[in-house]
Image (tube, grey):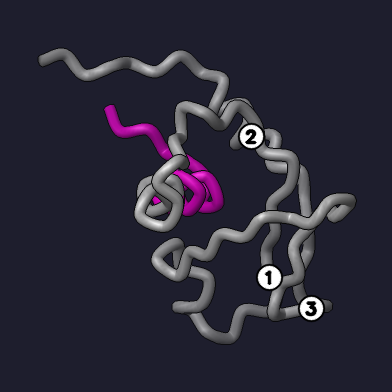
């Protein structure tokens, strides 16, 4: 049976697959919860924001969110459903 997942969760998981190419220390197993996620309400470019356009940046002390290119169009939210997904036990592949 194929599990249906939210689009933002699918994008997050794809980003997690790509992240080690940018930061070799990244591992999805180290992520236990997401504090915030963002979306753009007025997305004219259907290709914009693909996980393949992934960028990583360290936040400065005291900053809750990074600066994003789209400014006022960006809306932050608590991705509790993604954190719930990350807390689920995962099956490990058998050899």
- Viewed as shown, does residue 58 lie left or right of 78? left
Point 10% across, 15% down: residue? 95
Q: Is most of the magenta stretch helix, strand or loop?
A: helix
For the residues bearing labels 3 and 1, Cβ distance under 8 angstroms: no
Point 51% across, 18% down: residue? 88
Q: Quadrant of the N terminus?
A: top left
Whichever of callouts 2 and 1 sits on the residue coming sooner in the sequence is: 1
User: Is 45 situated above or below 29?
Assistant: below
Residue 37 position within the rendered picture, expressed as x and y whole percent measured from the top left: 69, 52
For the residues bearing labels 3 and 2, Cβ distance under 8 angstroms: no
Give how far apart the Cα atoms at labels 3 and 1 are. 10 Å
Label 3 or label 2, whichever lies nearer to me, is 3
Q: Secondary structure at mark 3?
A: helix
Q: Secondary structure at mark 1?
A: strand
What residue sits right under mark 1 in the picture? Answer: 40
Is 2 a magenta residue? yes
Q: Secondary structure at mark 2?
A: helix
Q: Which mark is residue 71?
A: 3
User: Is 33 situated above or below 46?
Assistant: above
Point 53% across, 70% down: residue? 49
State the extent of the magenta-drawn residues as a range: 1-15
Q: Which mark is residue 81?
A: 2
Residue 40 position within the rendered picture, expressed as x and y whole percent measured from the top left: 68, 70
């Amino acid at each position: 049976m194929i599990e249906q997942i939210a689009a933002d969760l699918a994008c997050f998981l794809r980003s997690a697959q790509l992240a080690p190419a940018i930061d070799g220390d990244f591992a999805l197993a180290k992520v236990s919860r997401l504090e915030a996620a963002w979306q753009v309400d007025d997305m004219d470019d259907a290709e914009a924001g693909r996980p393949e356009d992934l960028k990583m940046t360290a936040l400065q002390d005291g900053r809750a969110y990074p600066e994003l290119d789209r400014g006022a169009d960006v809306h932050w939210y608590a991705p509790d459903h993604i954190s719930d997904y990350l807390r689920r036990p995962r099956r490990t592949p058998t050899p």
